[in-house]
Image: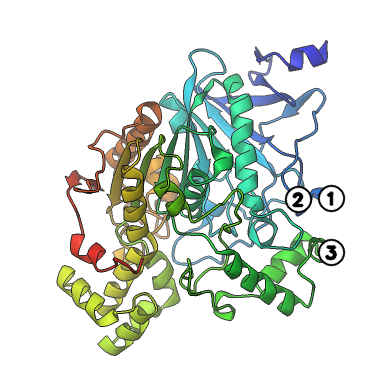
Amino acid sequence: MGLLLARIPSATAQDDGGLVATTEKGQVQGQRVGNVLIFKSIPYAAPPVGALRFAAPAPHQPWPGVRDATQRGPTAPFNRPPEGAIDGQPIFGSGWVKGDDYLTTNIWTPALTGPARPVLVFIHGGAFVLGTSDVPLYDGTTFAQKGVVLVSLNYRLGIEGFLKIKGVPSNLGIRDQLAALRWVQANIGRFGGDPANVTIFGESAGAMSVATLMGSPAAKGLFRRAIMMSGSGQAVLSGKQADLIAAKYASVLKIKNTAEAYRRFTPEQLLAAQQKVTPKMVKLNTDEYADPGSGTVLYFPVIDGDIVPAMPMTSVQQGASGASDLLLGYNSDEANYFLIPSGLLKKIKSNFVLFLAVKRLHPAPAALITVYKQAYPTKSLGELLSAMVTAYQFQVPSVQLADAHARQPGRTYMYEFAWPSSVAGGTYGAYHGLGLPFVFNQRALATGPRGMLGPGGGPAELAEKMQDAWVEFAKTGSPGWAPYTTAERQTMLINTTWQLQTNPHAKEIRAWEGVR
């Protein structure tokens, strides 16, 4: 009788006021918070331990009875970054929560029954080496209150998720994301969601993951729409670049580049080992492929001729995810998040030093600097470098991916997020990650002297309007402004007021042609 019931999509009210939903593998007990039902840490794949460590995600075993889904579960192992000028608690929580069963999803839904609702699946960022899905900032309550189902997921990170190791399936972190999306297709109807209307969205490495999924034949049919916040369609490594990183690790750790060798490390030892190779130790620029992180990070998805057949932008140009709708954008001052803490911007005190820094990004640094000085006459030399790094890593790749997708049948929409934070005396501007408290409508926990939004907080109207646009896109395929075309490059400038721009930053973007 129990097996029979487990196959029937159902929702059963419990005496304690919680709710039970039935997945393919068993029942889960959630909780009601206000008018939203929340389910935490539901497995989409088996724990990646033992023989399944450094292996493709495998189906989870069915569980007897009702699994508690009211508490936060374990996360993928990651090194929590040191605290800086901006409070990392909302994004990183308490850091790595230990436990084996961490390939899981979290779900916020208005109801388990009724009309099938649009589904948003969020993929967290963190340079493919850190982060987790169930932290205060990524609470999906306000999304559910607007009539959609919000799903977030964990995936393997760093060495366990993305290092190219002999005999190990490629891109395990992306394979985890694919497994989670297949789980959504099979189960989300039992949580009030519509498997035929799934929007994947992510920020930073999460947005790069979205681009990778858009280009992956393995993701076909798993989503209908995509949102990329501060991502890129060029953030992948070639096989050769990935081999260089793997070889450096094997050399530094004095091991063979095999699964057997890496399985001898405990997760704690592996996290310590992961930090022994730095970007400065591996020269990744090759004749065919530029270093996707321009010397700052090592981990990315790897072109493998399988689930990542080519650079995602190339795949999109060739028609991958051509029928999907795409909303993508970047923040005005992305690079400040990386460059201000390093102290680099203050070191740019002469045109010569600026020239040397820009030379790493562009073959004609003097000409590029002239373009940016004309575009931003009031910026300091350090601020000009930040603008160029922002363009190199986020703005230009976003525009190029938008151009590629706009030639396909699916609709394309572009935005630039320009609202400046007041944190650190307002020096960070509209930095990398700043859109998240608005899209998730979580302003309070990001307000304070070290809060992401700064001591002044952020406008409630902006948070409501941004989240409404994301929800509307998930529901209808349009965020509420004109689609992007290659001729006019319509871009919504998002600030306290919203303004649809035509061909913004045209001269600067043109200066990168043939380079990025």
Q: Residues within 10 Å of mark 3 (few under 14, many from 20)?
A: few
Measured in 3D between alpha carbons, the distance from the residue under mark 1 to the one under mark 3, in whole angstroms, is: 12 Å
Quarter that holds the C terminus:
bottom left
Q: Nearer the viewer, mark 1 or mark 3?
A: 1
Measured in 3D between alpha carbons, the distance from the residue under mark 1 to the one under mark 2, in whole angstroms, is: 7 Å
Mark 3 = which residue?
264
Q: Amino acid at mark 3?
A: Arg
Mark 1 = which residue?
51
Q: Is residue 17 visible?
A: yes
**Left or right: where 357 falls relative to 295:** left
Asked whether the beta carbons under mark 1 and mark 3 sit within 8 Å of each other, the answer is no
Image spot of residue 417 (x, y percent): 30, 51
Q: Nearer the viewer, mark 2 or mark 3?
A: 2
**Left or right: where 430 falls relative to 36:** left
Task: Name the quadrant containing residue 112.
Answer: top right
Q: Amino acid at mark 2?
A: Ala
Q: Amino acid at mark 1?
A: Ala
**Left or right: where 317 falls relative to 260:** left
Asked whether the beta carbons under mark 1 and mark 2 sit within 8 Å of each other, the answer is yes
Q: How many marks?
A: 3
Mark 3 or mark 1, which is nearer the start of the sequence? 1
Mark 2 = which residue?
55
Mark 3 or mark 2, which is nearer the start of the sequence? 2
Residue at 67% x, 68% y is 274
Dot 2 falls on a residue whose secondary structure is: loop
Q: Nearer the viewer, residue 393 or 38?
A: 393
